[in-house]
Amino acid sequence: MPETRLHSSTAFKIWIAGLLLLVFAGTAVYVCQLVHGLGVTDLSRDVSWGFYIAQFSFLGGVAATPLILLIPACCHGFVPFRKILVCAMFMAVAATISATLIIIVDLGQPRRALNVILHPSPSSLMFWDMVTLTAYLVLSLAVGRIGLACEKNGIEPPRWMIVPVYALGLAALATRIVGAFLFSGLPGRHYWHTAILAPRFLASAFSTGPALLLLMLFVLRRLTGFDAGRQAVRGLASITAYAMAANVLFFLFELFTVLYGQAPGPMHTVTYLFFGHDGQGAWINGWMWFASAAALLSLALLLPSGLRDNETLLPFALALVVAANWIDKGLSFMIGGFTPNPFGTITGYAPSLAEIAVGLGIVALGLVILSCLVRTALPAGEQTGP
């Protein structure tokens, strides 16, 4: 594997160098945050979770991607998915590491993360979130490494691999469910306090993960010649379409409950996100309308099989899915949860440049990890891209 990285193409080196520049820039801003505290962000007493935790919610969904492939490939014998399973594992590793770093950054002082380890509290959902994330990261690395070795040697995975594979699937499911419970168990937050939040998290993950994986496979095919196969592409596109349809339906169910019930707290949240309140929140309104339009347009392109099988339109539809889900989970989710606060007042929030810079740096680091891992996973004959 080291030889693969040493003989990388010029374009790959430029790509990694560009990402590392973002990493260094994010690190420099994070050092300023360590020195001056979370005051460099726009977080406050009323909005204690913001852009950082929102990215954690989104990246946690991306990390669950292997579950989409494990069930058809291992439980139903769908062979086409086995070729890309290793890529999904490596995507999970990169997303999980990024999500963990986001949490550490949000804590303000990294040493605070040791409190969860030194003073474990099984009654805390945060403790179980750390346990599931750690287990998921270890299992993803182990299963991905063994799967890569079997693929390169042209042999079938050993029979005992079925145990860690099932454990990986359960861990992927647990990370999403526990992550949703962290929010839905807060009765003072109307936007989160709903029994359907966990299904919404799962539907969002099962549409975002395959969409990003497919986009990555299209890029790899164009640059390196690696072809995942027509069946695998169709399978992932179908999963993305149906999961996105469920995600949109769940959101519409929530809107119906809020608008028909006319409960003041939930109503204020929805109207704030889409229309603002007394001039506040105007910046998020455009994002919400764009996300709604992107979600509906993506369904119009993905649900009809004729359009879904058109690989000219498919990348555009997948990009719309990712954009809509990122705005939903990576931007508006925190704002909706904290607006209004339990006292019925509104505290405006918008991500600061410091938060955006640190977040971009962490995502760039995740892309560096993913790029290097995928580069090692490609067969030697398929690494001759520009």
Image (spheres, rainbow, N blue to C red):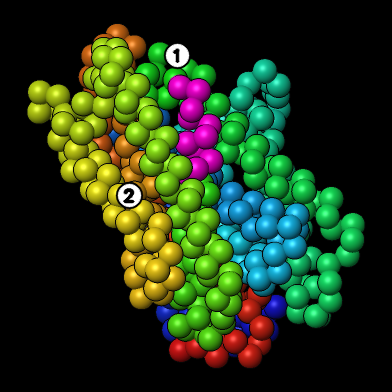
Residue visible at 56% across and 82% down in the picture: 226
Q: Secondary structure at mark 2?
A: helix
**Magenta part of the chain:** 194-204
Picture quadrant of residue 42: top left
- Front one among 355 and 62: 62
Label disc, if present, on residue 187 of the rendered structure: 1
| Extreme residue in the left direction | 279
The quadrant of the rendering that contains the N terminus is bottom right
Q: Is residue 374 above or below residue 66?
A: below
Left or right position of 8 against 259: right
Residue visible at 45% across and 83% down in the picture: 222
- Front one among 333 and 109: 333
Classed neighbour count for the residue bearing mark 1: other residues with Cα under 10 Å, few (<14), some (14–19), many (≥20) = few
The secondary structure that dominates the magenta segment is: helix
Dots 2 and 1: beta carbons under 8 Å?
Answer: no
The residue mark sitting in front, 2 or 1, is: 2
Determine which residue is flagged by label 2: 295
Please state which amino acid type lies under the numbered disc 1: Pro
